[in-house]
Amino acid sequence: MTGAAWEASADLVVVGGGVAGLTAARAASVRGLRVLTVSKGGPTDTSTQYAQGGIAVVAPRGDSVGSHVADTVAAGAGLCDEVAVESIVAAGRQAVASLRDLGAVFDRGGDGQVSRTREGGHSTRRIIHAGGDATGAEVQRALNAAGLPVLFGAAATRVVTDSGGVVGLQLLSDKGAGVIHAPAVLLATGGLGQLYACSTNPAGATADGVALALRAGAAVADIEFVQFHPTVLFSPGGVGRRPLISEAVRGEGARLVDGNGDSITAGVHPRGDLAPRDVVSKAIAARMRELGADYVYLDARSIPQFAQRFPTITASCLAAGIDPAAQLIPVAPAAHYQCGGVVTDLQGRTEVPGLYAAGEVARTGLHGANRLASNSLLEGLVMGERAGAAAAERSDVRAEVRAADSPALRRAPRGLVQRLMTEHASVVRDGGGLAGAAGELGAARPITASSVGELEDSALTLTARVLIAAALKRTESRGCHTRSDYPDTDRAARHSISIRMDADGQLRSDALELAGVD
Ligand code: SIN
């Protein structure tokens, strides 16, 4: 007996019900494992639900695995693990085929073939999409319809380990504190967008998986690379989850201009408005600073039948009083994607036996210093499948949580964390600002989390500390990480920074080798 209000057992507990989590749960279930998926929200409270552009997958004509790999590596600014990139990209077609077998329907053109669009950093049209700009919603619908058992409204509080690895998971639900005895836990909790005042991520993107993994002894890497999406609908005073204006809008011909009608990206990059995201976000931030403006514009008026091609975006714009077919759309960069995360191998294993991670929370080496557009649903599908399959290796391990305690966590108020991160760890950073933010976060108070909100705040506080520590250590500019005090890329810094947490809460960093990089 553990003293918990409720107990259950499973062969695998999956934390998170988005693309990676449900794909993993399915892969493990078909291998005969008793799988329980837990999600702190409801069936569509996932980042997957909000993904617009699509899934990057090698096109049947005029494309190749080599070309998709080259685009991914170019976007990743020297920090992709090329073995991981090749492996994940090459598995894309099979992963999409499995999703279609589950019932996912992708858009087709007049010729009956699956339509493909283009996004920043891609050399060709290889992005498949659904419902125009509602690809994530279709992926989520298809996976939800698979009917896997999910315990909604249950937040993970701690991965419990003993000397042999994982033995279970502690949770908080409306039935109180609970324990699931299990030899394997798979983190698929999504990202960290709620570290910032404005983000494209839903309210649940509070870095839970990063914090759970660090507290269980696993390493995180590349966490300083937070991708800011260049085109998020701007409204004065708007905070929280903000509507995304998919990069596919630029893929179909929209242009980024400032208030004077001048191009934002002319002369910045050979691919102009379809340069990799870090380049475009930096160009917008620089123009906003130069003009003292809070936003720039996306001119999509040349796109025929905009409302049919982009119904979700049209609805968001109309709700803000803008007709995108006739008016310029005000946009600004906002936090969008966590490029790094919990370090895993190419089967989703962390270094803690029995702890797996997949999707945005994980760092496989696919994204490096900047994720290529629409590679995230791809990674969630491929790595979800592999991690779910890998968890079967623990099915003969007998696991039992012996006592459920309430670990002391450190929490800073969410408003403070978001203000510090938005002011000092956004598109452009500097050492003074980062060090000041680290000092303020260092004063976070120990608590015993008794609500999901407090638990989330403690995950955000820990992740902010780790992200700032890595950003301070990276004394160069690369990919999504721009230091105004170190504006150049340093060849000697071409390695990932991995961070672990000691039992006494101290952070320790190491350089992580990249495979396939000289
Ligand atoms: C977009 O549609 O622009 C977002 C797609 C992505 O983040 O991969």
Image: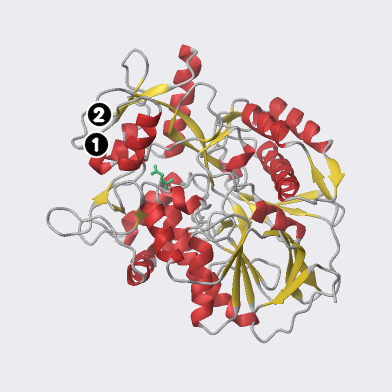
For badge 1, the amino acid type reads Phe
Residue linked to disc 1: 306
Q: Position of residue 64 (x, y in %)?
A: 28, 60
Location of residue 3 with respect to 493 vertically, above or below: below
The answer to which of 139 and 469 lies nearer the viewer is 139
Q: Would residue 468 be visible to someone looking at this image?
A: yes
Asked whether mark 2 and ligand 1 are closer than 8 Å, the reply comes as no
Q: Which mark is residue 325?
A: 2
Q: Quadrant of residue 492?
A: top right
In the figure, is residue 171 to the left or right of 59? right
Tags 2 and 1 in contact by the CB under 8 Å rule?
yes
In the picture shown, does residue 265 fall above or below 39?
A: above
Image check: 130 left or right of 167? left
User: Residue 462: x, y in percent?
Assistant: 74, 46
Q: Circle 2 sits in a helix, a strand or a loop, which is it?
A: loop
Q: How is the image coloured?
A: secondary structure
Q: Residue at x 49, y 73 (%)?
A: 26
Q: Which numbered disc flags the more N-terminal residue, 2 or 1?
A: 1
The crowding category of the residue bearing disc 1, from other C-alpha atoms within 10 Å (few below 14, some 14 to 19, many at least 20), is some
Residue 444 versus residue 483: which sits nearer the camera? 444
